[in-house]
Amino acid sequence: MFRKTPPQTPPPNPNMPVERVTSVLGPGILWKGNLRGTGGIRIEGTFEGDITLRGLVVVGETGKVVCQTLQANTVIVAGTVTGNITAEKLEIRGTGRVWGDVIISALATEEGGFLRGQVRMEEKIEFPLETSSSESSSETA
C-alpha cells in the first residue's frame, strides 16, 4: 500500500555515446580485427585493426593500438597509438604517444605527452551512422 516504486531507468539509446568503459582488453592480449559499435573500451594489451565506436576509447599505459583509423567520441591515450584519430575529444596523458594525424574538436595534453602528425580542429565532428540490416531492407521496399 505504501510501497515506493523504484525509479525507472530509460533504455539505452544506441545512437548516444557511452562515456564509460564497458569492455576491457587486458594486458598480454593481442587482438587483430576491426571493432565497431557503441560502448566504451579500455585497451591494456595490443589491438591491431580499425576502431569505430560511438563512445569512449582508453588506451592504458600498457596498451598499444596499430590502426589506419581510430574513430570515437572520446579518446584517452596513456599508451601508444600508431594511426589516424578522429574524435570529439582527444586527451594525451603524460605517458601517451600518438603517431598519426588527428581530427578533433578538443585536445588536451599533459606534460610529456607526444604527438607526431598533423592536427586539424573542427567545430563539430560527424560520425557516419551505421544502419542495421532491418533499416536497410526497409529502405528498399
Image (spheres, rainbow, N blue to C red):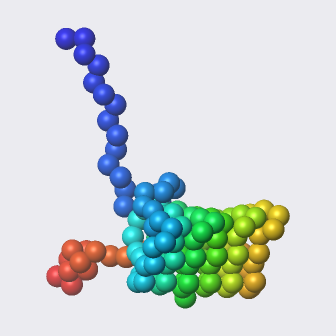
Q: Which residue is located at x 40 percent, y 83 percent?
A: 33
Q: On the picture, is 80 further left or further right than 119?
A: left
Q: Which residue is located at x 51 percent, y 68 percent?
A: 27
Q: On the picture, is 83 further left or further right than 21?
A: right
In which quadrant of the rendered image does the N terminus lie? top left
- Does the image show residue 58? yes
In which quadrant of the rendered image does the C terminus lie? bottom left
Query: Looking at the picture, how far across and down is residue 127, in whole percent?
Result: 50, 74
Q: Which residue is located at x 76 percent, y 64 percent?
A: 94
Q: Quadrant of residue 75?
A: bottom right
Query: Looking at the picture, how far across and down is residue 9, in whole percent?
Result: 34, 40
Given residues 130 and 28, the one toward you in this image is 28
Q: Residue furthest left?
A: 141
Q: On the picture, is 125 further left or further right than 16?
A: right
Query: Looking at the picture, how far across and down is residue 39, in whole percent?
Result: 43, 62
Q: Residue furthest front?
A: 28
Given residues 55 and 115, the one toward you in this image is 115
- Does the image show residue 15? no
